[in-house]
Image (cartoon, coloured by chain):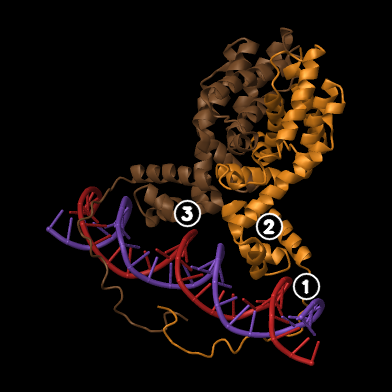
Chain colours: A brown, B orange, C purple, D red
Amino acid sequence: MDSADGSGEKKTARRRSSERVLQRDPERTRAAILEAATKEFAENGMGGARVDAIAERAGTNKRMLYHYFGDKERLYLHVLEEAYVAIRTAERELHIGDRSPKEGIGELALFTWRYFLKHPEFLSLLGTENLHRARWLRQSVRLKELHSHLIGELSQVIARGKAEGVFAENADPLNVYLTIASLGYFYLSNQYTLSTIFGRELATPENLDAWERHIVHVTLASIAA
Amino acid sequence: MDSADGSGEKKTARRRSSERVLQRDPERTRAAILEAATKEFAENGMGGARVDAIAERAGTNKRMLYHYFGDKERLYLHVLEEAYVAIRTAERELHIGDRSPKEGIGELALFTWRYFLKHPEFLSLLGTENLHRARWLRQSVRLKELHSHLIGELSQVIARGKAEGVFAENADPLNVYLTIASLGYFYLSNQYTLSTIFGRELATPENLDAWERHIVHVTLASIAA
DNA sequence: CCGGCCAGTAACTAAACAGTTACTTGATGA
DNA sequence: TCATCAAGTAACTGTTTAGTTACTGGCCGG
C-alpha cells in the first residue's frame, strides 16, 4: 500500500504556469503525433519506442496521444498503415502498364529503390513489424485491398512481355516484385552491419548508384527470354 | 522518499526454501544464458528483450547473468558475435574455391539460403542490430578478421570464372554476395508482412523450394558472360 | 450570455524494469 | 579440518514506463 495516508489536499497545489497558449487545432495535433510516432517507432522499434518521447517530439503531451489513438499499439498500427498507403499511392502514379514491358519493369525497379532510399523509416517499420510476425498488420482492415492493384498491373506487363517474346514463359509477377524489393531492402536496411563487417561504406553516392543499376540489370536478366 | 521508515530487521526474514539444488557447473550455466539470450533478443529485439525473461529461460537468475556478462548490452554483443562466428565457420566448410566457378557460386547461394532458413534467429539479430545502425557490432573487436575469408575465396572463384569466360568481366565479388544474401534475407525476414499483404503464404515447402531455385538462377544470370 | 463540451495541460500512479545487495552452499587445497 | 572462494539464490531498490486523473480555458448553440 502506497497511498494509505488519506490526505485530501494534494490536488489543490497544481496549475502554476498560466501563460499557456491553447493550440485548438485538432487536425494539426493529430498529424504532428502521427509524424512524431513514425520517427520514434522507426528509430527504436515497438519495444524501444517511448510514448513520452512521441508526445514531446509532437510538441504535445500524452493525454492527446491517448485521446486520438487509444493506446501505443493502435498508434503504431496507424503509423504502419499510413506508411503502406503512402508507398502504394506513389506507386500507382507510375502507370507501369502504359510502357513497354522492359521499360515498365525497369521503372518499377527504379521507383522502388528510390522510394526505399528516400524513406528509411518505411523499411524500419517493416523490419519491426516482421520481428513481431505481422502481429499488428494482420489486424488491419484498411490494408486488404491496397496491394492487389500492384500485382494486377505487374501481371499485365509481364503477360505482354511474354506475348512479345522478351520475357521467359515462367516469369512470375510476385517473384519479380520480390526480387526488386529484396535487392533494395537488404542493401539499405542492412547497410550498417554490412559496411562494418566488409569494411566498405555502402552508402556513398557512387555505391548507391552502382547498386541502382545492378537492381535493374538483375531484375531484367532474371526474366529475360 | 520511500524507505524513510528505518527498520533494521527486514533482511533477517529471508532464505526460506532450503531444499535447493546447486548447479555448480559454470560452463553449462554460461551456455544456457547465451542460448536463452539469443532467443529472447531474436524474438523481441534489444528494446523488447527482458533480462528477467532471459534468466528464467536459462533456468537461472539475474545475478549469474550479470556475473558472466556484465550487463544487458554486453550480453547482447556476445550473442551477436556468436551468431556471426557460427555462420562464417559453417561457410568455410564449403570450400567453394575447390569447385568449378558456376558450381561454387551456386553452392554458396544454396548454403546461404538454407542457413538463413534454419537460423531465423540470425536474421532477426541482424535486423535488430541494423535498426540501431550497428551500434554494438561496431564496438566488437572479435569480428574484424572474421569476414575477409569469405570475400577472398569468392574473389578467387569469380576471377577463375572470368578467365574461363563463363562470368562477365564486370562481375564483382561483394555484389555477388549481396545479391545472394538480399534474395534470401528479404524473403524470409519479411515473409510475415508479405504473406499478409499479398494473401499468399510464402513459407510453404513448395514456395520455399521455388525461391531456392530462383536465388540460384538469378545469381548466376546476373553474372553470366 | 452562459453552460456544457472539446482541446489541451501537467501531475500522478501502479507496474515493470535493469541492475544490486545480502546472503547460502559446497568443493578444494593449505 | 576449516578458511576461502567460486557458484548460486532471491529479495530489494531506484528509475522508467504506459496509461490515468484532475483540472483549465475558450468557443458555440440555445
| Chain designation of label 3 | A
Of badges 3 and 2, nearer the viewer stands 2
Which residue is label 3 attached to? Answer: A50
Q: Count the numbered circles shown.
A: 3
Image coordinates for residue B212, horizontal then vertical, percent: 79, 31
Q: Residue A138 carries which label?
A: none
Image coordinates for residue B149, horizontal then vertical, percent: 74, 34
Sequence-wise, which precedes: disc 1 or disc 2? Answer: 1
Give above or below for B218 relative to A49: above
Is residue B73 at least partly visible in the picture? yes
Image coordinates for residue A90, horizontal then vertical, percent: 50, 26
Of badges 1 and 3, nearer the viewer stands 1
Separation of disc 1 and disc 2 at Cα? 20 Å
Which residue is label 2 attached to? Answer: B37
Look at label 2 and name its amino acid: Ala
Asked where in the image residue A2 lies, by quadrant, the reply is bottom left
Which residue is label 1 attached to? Answer: B24
What residue is shown at x 40% (from left), y 56% (from top)? Answer: A62
The quadrant of the picture occupied by the C terminus of chain B is top right
Separation of disc 3 and disc 2 at Cα? 23 Å
Q: Within 10 Å of the Cα at label 1, are there few (<14), some (14-19), or many (20+) other Cα atoms? A: few
Of badges 1 and 2, nearer the viewer stands 1
